[in-house]
Image (cartoon, rainbow, N blue to C red):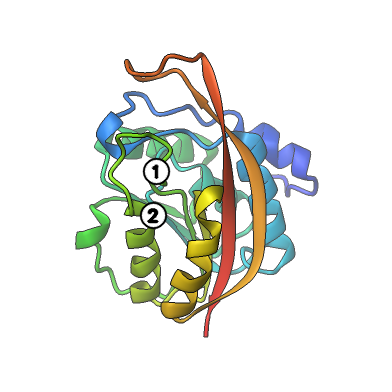
Amino acid sequence: MKKITRKKHLEMRLQNIPSHPKPKVGLEQYTTPSVIASDLIWNAFGFGDIEDRNVLDLGCGTGIFTIGSALMGASSSIGVDIDEDSIRLAGNVSDKLKLDNVEFIVSDIDEFNEPLNVDTLFQNPPFGSQRRADKGQDLKFVKKAVEINAQVLYSFHMASTEEFLMKFYEDNNLEITHIFRYKFPIPKIYDFHNKEKQIVDVIVIRAILK
């Protein structure tokens, strides 16, 4: 496969990954736009966090960070998600691209205890954009990243929780090195949505284990 040398080319590749086939409201499933995923992966690549690294995509959905990392030269790229429909779709995309450094696993993160050597971990967990959402799910994902002993973490959160997150990361032995800010579009995919699209301010925290 031809090496990707431009962020725009990566974005174009990621645009071919379908959205969640059957989004489940209880999992707060929203597909990460290719423009956001490509920007974050490109930055991670620039930091040396992807090429020849072991990457884990926790709560991978349809696998945009798993596949994107594989395309950018990860030694291995593993996606984990509780939703079988999403994993099936992600696996089909990976097979079509003939990626031999990708693996997908169906598992709840609470039960995921694979002995992995994880250099870089991406996660876009349920971050509480819904009023009725189960709050604190993103914090559970952060704690799991620490338990897995990921050396570098990229994690999505609501921007409004930034001040609280500073202390939370510190208390969990993580040093924040960078914060990326995005306008995250949430389309009308659930019955309770009353707008065609809502824009949510999110941050992605890059942190390293102390």
Helix, strand or loop under label 1: loop
Q: Amino acid at mark 1?
A: Gly
Viewer-side residue, 92 vs 55: 55
Name the residue tied to disc 1: 128
Position of 160 compared to 118: left or right? Answer: right
Residue at the location (66% across, 54% down)?
A: 180
Any part of residue 22 in sight: yes
| On screen, residue 102 above or below 201 | below
Viewer-side residue, 9 vs 209: 209
Residue at the location (80% across, 45% down)?
A: 6
Assess whether mark 1 and mark 2 are in contact (beta carbons under 8 angstroms): yes
Name the residue tied to disc 2: 138
Q: Which residue is most to the left? A: 111
Position of 192 compared to 52: left or right? Answer: left
Separation of residues labelled 2 and 1 (CA atoms): 8 Å
- Residue 103 is situated, as x and y percent measured from the top left of the image, at 39, 53
